Image (cartoon, grey):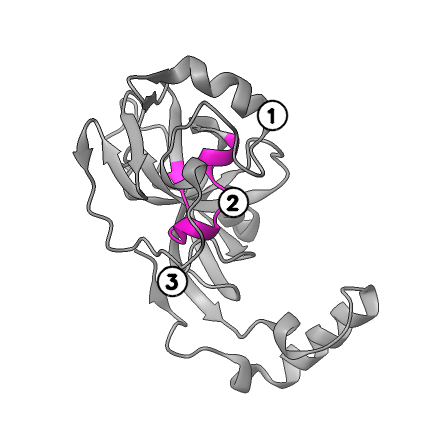
Amino acid sequence: MIAVFVVTFLAQAFTIPSESMEQTLLIGDYLLVDKFCFGDNAGNRLLPYRKVRRGDIVVFHYPVNPAQDFVKRVVALPGDRLRLINKRVYINGAAVEEPYAQHSAAPRDSYRDDFPRTDSPGYGVDAKWWKEMPKLVEDRQLIVPEGHYFVLGDNRDDSQDSRYWGFVPRENIIGRPLLIYWSSANLSNDLPGSPSVGDRLYHLAYAATHVLQMTRWERTFRLVR
């Protein structure tokens, strides 16, 4: 009963599945997610609830497919006016300092790097989002509606985020990552084979017998910021 209560209301385990948050979070990081901090604090001053802030890393149900959970960083809040110019984020006309943002040597992409663009969609843009987005653009700035958040991956040139599928509704936010409780090398890079049931069992058995060698000790028990 205690375990069910903790998983339902307080904390949840989460695994990083992609490179979109590098170098803040890596594939193979296992997170403990705080589901408590963004609770409804209306009229309650005893519990440590708080509102979602710019710069928060959040875990949320993917709006296009709520069965999937994503992790990204909140860049813009309800009412904010957002624009990217040459990969630099501007909120309400002011440039934002983002020491956590990573950029690669990927070829320039006008949709991704100078967002919002309403003249032509970028590769991988959700059709529904492409239809809705122009209605929210004013003076080349995207206006974040009430009850929604704009999120980006820290690995800006390799992240499917709000630029491609839209805002995260407040009710989709699960919580924020607190701690990397374990970090391991990506087995799929170390071991051959397709992701069949047999291969997954082999990978699990390998992990169980090589846990000391696989563990990234410098990342294990690291607080997420």
75 magenta-colored: no
**Residues at badges 2 and 3 in contact (C-beta under 8 Å)?**
no
Sort mark 3 into few (<14), some (14-19) or many (20+) by Cα contacts within 10 Å: few
Element type at mark 2: strand
Left or right placement of residue 203 versus residue 157 in this view? right
Q: Which of marks 3 and 2 precedes in the sequence? A: 3
Which of 83/169 is in front? 83
Report the amino acid beneath label 3: Gln
Which residue, given by chain and number where applicable, does mark 2 sit on?
Answer: 70
- Mark 3 and mark 1: Cα distance apart in space: 30 Å
- Mark 1 and mark 2: Cα distance apart in space: 20 Å
Q: Which mark is residue 23?
A: 3
Q: Where does the magenta region start and end?
A: 151-165
163 magenta-colored: yes
Q: Residue at x 52, y 85 (%)?
A: 212
Residue 215 lies, in percent from the top left, at: 50, 79
Residue 119 lies, in percent from the top left, at: 46, 23
Residue 142 lies, in percent from the top left, at: 35, 23
Q: Residue at x 70, y 74 (%)?
A: 203
